[in-house]
Image: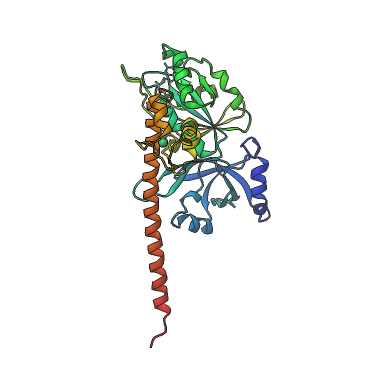
Amino acid sequence: MTLEDLGWSDLFAAHFAPWAEQGLVPARVVAQKGLTQVSTGEAEHYAELAGKLRREVELPGGGAGYPAIGDWVALRPPTGDGRALIHAVLPRKSKFSRKVAGNRTDEQVVAANIDTIFLVSGLDADFNPRRIERYLTAAWDSGARPVVVLNKVDKCEDPDGCLLEAQAVTMGVPVHRVSAKHALGVEELEPYLGRGQTVGLLGSSGVGKSTLINRLLGREAQRTGNVREGDDRGRHTTTHRELFVAPGGALLLDTPGLREIQLWEGDQGIESAFPDIEELAERCRFNDCRHQGEPGCAVEEAVAKGELAAERLESYRKLQKEQRQLQIKQDEIARIREKQRTKAIHRAQRVFKPRT
Ligand code: GDP
Ligand code: ZN
């Protein structure tokens, strides 16, 4: 395998140049399960963070600096039996992040440098355009190109109706109907699966991501969930690999972190996912209109006139509310950190104060 097969490009090469001078080699993180596994194309190694990088990422707010699956890193290959050392994470082309569980609202990148993200949704009883909308927001935030994959088309009584419903929220993003299980329509995905292209899979448990991966790989690489009697929800099973090379040369990335993605900061995603509402909002009387009963609200007027679906406004509000709450939490954490810092400075000043 060459670096290009792994997704290497001129962009990464440019970022890597200064590290090459120090005798380091580029490598890509291919698994991140407690241990970091990297590939240089020629060899795979387990890798640890070099001391300086470790200290940086352990600082408050340094969480995004940890290498994630898909990252390109500057690596000191192992000598003898030792581990390889990661000296730097190269700037990312795209990234999916999530809130770190618990109280700390620190960013944790769960997957990096994805070119195309398949937003997989099941056309069974679980079909839910609102959920697609939410995933789409996360996708726009990431920098990866989103593609909506409506799986289980064999289960759908009205595939055209479902397509229209999906298109009402996807705003021009490509939508494909497939059946991973029965090999229907899967060839439509080929244009995204070129050599060295990194494709991530996002979607709720049971929509058929593992089945789709197996289909695209042409082998049983991922274990799929078993459907219980009368229940379309597959049981997610823990998997071993997280990055697979498809026959055409694409890199399929399926990691538990992506499966559990939550929304992260930034209104950018909301705006790209709701261009219709943002456009209407420009005609609201107040600049900071929240479209919740303010006078002269063009958005609510459009709903009243039947020009905008009430549910669409509802999911927009919900997303905004979640992002506001996250913002408040982040501000709070920033405040606490600042306080700690000031305290530390005062302590240091006390120590150095000359005694009288
Ligand atoms: P994941 O949790 O997203 O990885 O979902 P799985 O790939 O494990 O699939 C969940 C269940 O849906 C399994 O029982 C699959 O056999 C089933 N499934 C996947 N794709 C299809 C499809 O195209 N049609 C039907 N009818 N079932 C499917
Ligand atoms: Zn308004």
Q: Would residue 313 appear left or right of 72 to someone viewing this image?
A: left
Query: Which quadrant of the figure contains the C terminus?
Result: bottom left
Query: Which quadrant of the figure contains the N terminus?
Result: top right
- Total count of labels: 0
Residue at 49% x, 23% y is 149
Q: Residue 196's spot in the image, x, y percent?
A: 62, 33
- Residue 221 in view, yes or no: no
Which quadrant holds residue 325? top left
Front residue of 32/298: it is: 298
Front residue of 187/275: it is: 275
- Residue 227 in view, yes or no: yes
Q: Residue 276's spot in the image, x, y percent?
A: 48, 30
Q: Residue 31's spot in the image, x, y percent?
A: 50, 40
For the rendered model, the colour scheme is rainbow
Residue ranking furthest to the left:
229
Relative height, residue 99 to residue 338 (above, below): above
Residue ranking furthest to the bottom:
356
Residue ranking furthest to the top:
157
Q: Residue 323's spot in the image, x, y percent?
A: 40, 42
Which quadrant holds residue 265? top left
* View quadrant of ligand 1: top left
Residue at 51% x, 39% y is 142
Residue at 56% x, 22% y is 189
